[in-house]
Image (cartoon, rainbow, N blue to C red):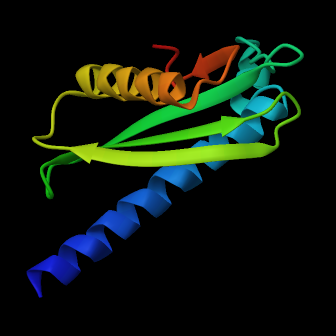
């Protein structure tokens, strides 16, 4: 039963990461979120012509003692290319976890041999 519970937890984390990345990607493609537009803050950029964008996010569960990473690659017009989720333990502070997620994304993109990748994280790490 323990193996099944872990599988269910992994599926839940994967779904949560992909939903977060999807929402942030939609906001990115729309230019910026409504809160950013109201406050006159930064405007996210689409990748340049012929480039890809890799959105990276991390989530932290003290209950499961795990950090999860979600990565989603889209082309210049926002079409889905590929996604990946990973997790590591033990849980850590958010800045360290987000840096580890970016490191994992860079390694993954290198393995895929995709040229011209722009990386984006929610807090602009």
Q: Residue furthest bottom?
A: 1
Q: Who's the residue at 84% across and 13% down the image? A: 48
Q: Nearer the viewer, residue 117 or 39?
A: 117
Q: Is residue 41 above or below residue 107?
A: above
Any part of residue 120 in sight: yes
2 w.r.t. 55: above or below = below
Q: Could you tell me if residue 121 is visible in this image? A: no
Q: Please state, as top left, top right, bottom left or bottom right, where the C terminus lies in the image.
A: top left
Residue 57, image x and y in percent? 46, 35
**Within the image, what quadrant is residue 101 found in?**
top left
Residue at 37% x, 59% y: name it. Answer: 13
Q: Give the quarter of the image for residue 102.
A: top left
Vertical arrangement, residue 10 with respect to residue 29, above or below: below
At x 57% / y 55%, what residue is drawn? 19
Q: Is residue 10 left or right of residue 15?
A: left
Q: Position of residue 29 (x, y in %)?
A: 81, 33
The residue drawn where x is 74% and y is 36% is: 27
Q: Position of residue 73 (x, y in %)?
A: 65, 36
Point out residue 110 in the picture as x, y percentages from the top left corner. 50, 21
Number of marks present in the image shown: 0
User: For residue 40, what is the image quadrant?
Assistant: top right
Report the quarter where the N terminus lies.
bottom left
In the image, taking residue 105 as reference, residue 67 lies left or right, namely: left
């Amino acid at each position: 039963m323990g193996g099944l519970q872990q599988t269910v937890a992994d599926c839940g984390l994967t779904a949560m990461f992909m939903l977060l990345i999807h929402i942030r990607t939609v906001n990115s493609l729309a230019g910026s979120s409504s809160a950013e537009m109201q406050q006159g803050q930064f405007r996210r950029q689409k990748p340049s012509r012929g480039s890809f964008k890799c959105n990276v996010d991390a989530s932290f569960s003290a209950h499961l003692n795990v950090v999860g990473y979600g990565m989603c690659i889209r082309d210049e017009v926002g079409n889905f290319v590929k996604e990946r989720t990973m997790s590591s333990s033990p849980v850590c502070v958010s800045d360290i976890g987000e840096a580890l997620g970016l490191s994992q994304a860079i390694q993954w993109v290198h393995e895929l041999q995709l040229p011209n990748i722009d990386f984006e994280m929610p807090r602009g790490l």
